Image (cartoon, rainbow, N blue to C red):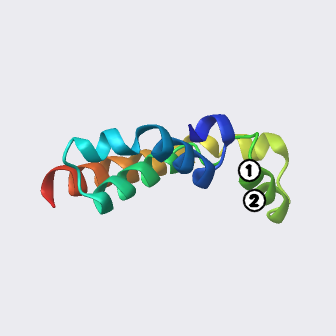
């Protein structure tokens, strides 16, 4: 959902509206569900169609090509956050 909008907040709103009740019906605690959905949305928070992409490129005086080169690193950081949140809130806590 966040990939379509390139926005963490909009992606989370769409995901919770679509899947929120199903996630909670599976017995997931509301806080754990919120953490896991939010961290999942951050994996693709900086796609080129989003505002965050252009704001960060402009603030650092980067060309679009330079900014595009950072996407894999941002995806790794977001993916790591998602894995850690899922392990912590989905299995340990």
Q: Tell me where residue 32 sits by quadrant.
A: bottom left
Residue at which label 2 appears: 56
Is residue 73 rendered to the left or right of residue 40? right
Residue, x 80% and y 52% (percent of image)? Answer: 54
Helix, strand or loop at disc 1? helix
Q: Tell me where residue 26 sits by quadrant.
A: top left
Image location of residue 77, percent across then percent down = 47, 51
In front here: 86 or 17? 17
Helix, strand or loop at disc 2? helix
Indicate the quadrant containing the N terminus: top left, top right, bottom left or bottom right.
top right
Residue, x 52% and y 50% (percent of image)? Answer: 42
Q: Do the residues labelled 2 and 1 touch (CB within 8 Å)?
A: yes
User: In this picture, is 4 found above or below 27?
Assistant: above
Indicate the quadrant containing the C terminus: top left, top right, bottom left or bottom right.
bottom left
Residue at which label 1 appears: 53
Residue, x 42% and y 45% (percent of image)? Answer: 79
User: In this picture, is 60 found above or below 25?
Assistant: below
The crowd level at tag 2 (other Cα within 10 Å; few <14, some 14-19, many 20+) is few
Image location of residue 72, percent across then percent down = 57, 40
Q: Is residue 76 visible?
A: no
Circle number at residue 91? none
């Amino acid at each position: 959902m966040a990939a379509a909008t390139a926005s963490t907040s909009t992606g989370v709103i769409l995901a919770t509206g679509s899947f929120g009740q199903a996630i909670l019906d599976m017995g997931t605690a509301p806080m754990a569900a919120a953490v896991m959905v939010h961290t999942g949305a951050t994996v693709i928070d900086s796609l080129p169609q989003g505002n965050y992409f252009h704001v960060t490129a402009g603030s650092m005086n980067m060309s679009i090509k330079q900014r595009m080169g950072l996407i894999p690193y941002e995806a790794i950081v977001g993916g790591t956050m998602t894995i850690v949140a899922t392990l912590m809130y989905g299995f340990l806590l």
